[in-house]
Amino acid sequence: MSGKEQEYVTEAFLSNYIAPIGPMVDAFEREFSEYTGISHCVALSSGTAAMHLALRHLFSSEYGSQTSSPPVVLASTLTFIGSVSSAVFMDAELRFVDCDTFSWNMDVSLLKEAVDECLREGREIAAVIPTDLYGQCADYDAIRAVCDPHGIPVVLDAAEAMGAAYKGRHAGCGGAASIFSFNGNKIITTSGGGMLASEDKALIDHARKLSTQARENFPHYEHTEVGYNYRMSNVVAAIGRGQLEVLDERVARRREIFDFYRDDLSGLPGVSFMPEAEYGRANRWLTVVEIDSEQAGVDRETIRLALEQENIESRPLWKPMHLQPVFKGCKVYGGTLSERLFDQGLCLPSGTSMSGDDLSRVCGSVKAVFDGVIL
Ligand SMILES: *Cc1c(COP(=O)(O)O)cnc(C)c1O
């Protein structure tokens, strides 16, 4: 927290709006739209809820009639499960798409292969969900060039990408809808929360209604469809307003942290850093390295355990969805690159509150592994 959040939370308490609606929620949505340039949005209890509502709307408007086989959802395989769990809630068939080498995001040629195959099979594609991995935007324009001719909606999972940019616009611009997360681990947080954003006012209006138990506009409780309890609380929105004000600083600091690691560690054999695609500016939510064990003479897991010995927490990358037991049997287009990244990749400590000394200590511990000092 930066300190500004507390003032807004106090204001929420003084107004006595301790509820899933209120002036802080309205203001947070307004300020989010101003910050991102996305015209409409609805503040929700999580990013996962945002994805669920996006799919609920897209399915209801386009897939009202029952067809024999379920619609397909194509999603990045190198992602967090919150990106794709909603497709399961919607009884869609999930198929996964591998990443590319220059952004580690959805490989557009593999996406095209997937779309072509689904269409050849006569399958409807309800949505394509590319993830902006670790705060770097996928190549939105290239993905839309594949999807738009077939009228396939693209739901951008920008959960990790607050403050990132694609071709000069904020992450999440230009999809049918986009989702953001303010979970505790993200670059800005409300403790837990999410946002669904879109240029499509009807989509956001419908999502807003679904998020509050789909109550119709009557004096009593009237329902013509079933919704959820997914709205963001007024207290939580107060935290979000304070966090939005420090987002630019957070991104600047995360990028500094990335540069520090890169300057200090990229000389080591077999160590490379997550690339930044030319079209955008990543928020560097996490600094991610890849360790080529043959060149390095040491593998990722050895380094992770050595850091843990020093009380330094680091983690493997997201385990690809097509390797998850729960998605056994789901089709994957490509897959070897994300498997390699899962095998060799390491997320380094990247919190904005880390000091220069903290960063030097992490780098020192990594270099010590290479020097064989700890081994
Ligand atoms: C965090 C995250 C989500 C889900 O957001 P929650 O707010 O935690 O529900 C979805 N997709 C990705 C890629 C994420 O990192």
Image (tube, rainbow, N blue to C red):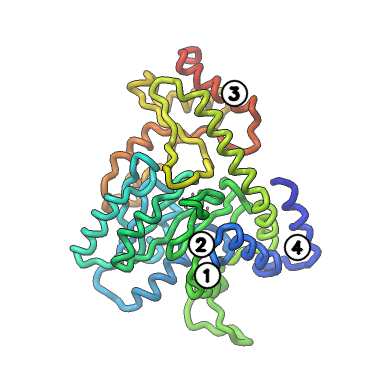
Foreground mark, 1 or 4, reads: 4
Q: Are marks 2 and 3 in contact (CB under 8 Å)?
A: no
| Cα distance between the residues tagged 1 and 4 | 24 Å
Q: Amino acid at mark 2?
A: Ala
Cβ at disc 1 under 8 Å from ligand 1:
no
Foreground mark, 2 or 3, reads: 3
Find disc 4 in the rendering and name its residue. Answer: 12
CA neighbours of label 3 inside 10 A, class few (<14), some (14 to 19), many (20+): some
Which residue of the protein is positioned furthest toward the left in this rendering?
120
Q: Amino acid at mark 3?
A: Ser
Cβ at disc 2 under 8 Å from ligand 1:
yes
Find disc 3 in the rendering and name its residue. Answer: 360
The residue at 43%/62% (across/down) is: 175
- The percent position of residue 291, horizontal first and vertical second, equals 40, 27
The residue at 71%/46% (across/down) is: 2
Which residue of the protein is positioned furthest toward the bottom in this rendering?
219
Q: Amino acid at mark 1?
A: Tyr
- The percent position of residue 97, horizontal first and vertical second, equals 31, 50
Question: Of the residues under marks 1 and 4, which one precedes in the sequence?
Answer: 4
| Cα distance between the residues tagged 1 and 3 | 47 Å
Question: Of the residues under marks 4 and 3, which one precedes in the sequence?
Answer: 4
Find disc 2 in the rendering and name its residue. Answer: 49
Residue 329 seen in the current view:
no
Find disc 1 in the rendering and name its residue. Answer: 228
